[in-house]
Image: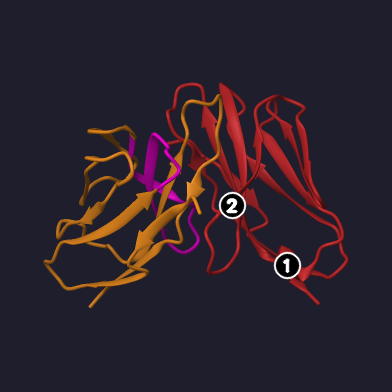
Chain colours: A orange, B red
């Protein structure tokens, strides 16, 4: 089945620790995205990538980093600089070759602070 | 940052009722609007991609309309069923942005 796989489903971070959230897709999509969701708010864009080895900051990139070494993979690192990391994180991808393609989402990772 | 609003925030209806909710977005420089359904414990799923003023899309009992001149889209559900219970998200993009801005969602609960 084609889709997006996020792991782990739940993640706990200690103070001062960096953690990495995995996102893999087998849809052959060029574009990939990371969103954060907080209660009562819409999805907010952290980072996005439209091509391998290139990525751009979204609206709330501070305290996060990403890489795009392979088309299929777009891992997100939550660094110790992110002071309020507790949230639900969603990864998405889309085919940007079409005129206007919807995004396909993973099941998400819930990150909590210990 | 663009402002995308959705109303109501949450909604409870009885099985069989028809319902509708609203997505409001900036009325200038429209590019596209997407609707997604997000069921609990699942990933968001695309419902509609809307690009033209006056667009009307339909999928089963769910339909959507688009008014780009006044900056709103309506999502309608006819004869709601418990399986329609979900959060419905809209996402807007203008001509200048490279990405979509999501609204906070409308949480629908359909009571049997």
Which one is in front, A27 or B106? A27
Q: Which mark identifies residue B83?
A: 1
Chain for numbered disc 1? B
Q: Is residue B26 left or right of residue A8?
A: right
User: In the rendered view, does A28 fall on the left or right side of B109?
Assistant: left
Mark 1 to mark 2 CA distance (whole Å): 14 Å
Q: Disc number at residue A54?
A: none
Which SS class for mark 2? strand
Q: Which residue is mark 2?
A: B45
Residue at image location 15% in from the left, 62% down from the top: A18
Q: Position of residue B4 (x, y in %)?
A: 55, 42
- Whichever of callouts 1 and 2 sits on the residue coming sooner in the sequence is 2
Which residue is drawn at the image coordinates 37% and 69% (left, top)? A9
Which quadrant would the C terminus of chain A be assigned to in this image?
Answer: bottom left
SS class, disc 1: helix
Residue at (21, 54) in percent of width and height: A77
Instruction: Tell me: residue B69, above or below residue A28.
Output: above
Q: Nearer the viewer, residue A22 or B73?
A: A22
Which contiguous range is marked in magenta?
A26-49
Tell me where residue A38 appears, x and y as whole percent: 42, 61
Residue B108, placed above or below residue B36: below
């Amino acid at each position: 089945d084609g889709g997006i796989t996020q792991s782990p489903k739940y993640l706990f971070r200690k103070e001062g620790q960096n953690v990495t959230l995995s996102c893999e897709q087998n849809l052959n999509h060029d574009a990939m995205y990371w969103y954060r969701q907080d209660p009562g708010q819409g999805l907010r864009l952290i980072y996005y990538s439209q091509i391998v080895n290139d990525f751009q900051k979204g609206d709330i990139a501070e305290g996060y980093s990403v890489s795009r070494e392979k088309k299929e993979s777009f891992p997100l690192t939550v660094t110790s600089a992110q002071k309020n990391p507790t949230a639900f994180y969603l990864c998405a991808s889309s085919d940007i070759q079409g005129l206007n393609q919807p995004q396909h989402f993973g099941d998400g990772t819930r990150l909590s602070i210990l | 940052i663009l402002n995308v609003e959705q109303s109501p925030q949450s909604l409870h209806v009885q099985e069989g009722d028809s319902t509708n909710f609203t997505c409001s977005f900036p009325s200038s420089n429209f590019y596209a609007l997407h609707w997604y359904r997000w069921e609990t414990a699942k990933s968001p799923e695309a419902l509609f991609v809307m690009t033209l003023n006056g667009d009307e899309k339909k999928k089963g009992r769910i339909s959507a309309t688009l008014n780009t001149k006044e900056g709103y889209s309506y999502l309608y559900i006819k004869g709601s069923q418990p399986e329609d219970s979900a959060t419905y998200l809209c996402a807007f993009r203008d001509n200048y942005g490279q990405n979509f801005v999501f609204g906070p969602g409308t949480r629908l609960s359909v009571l049997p």
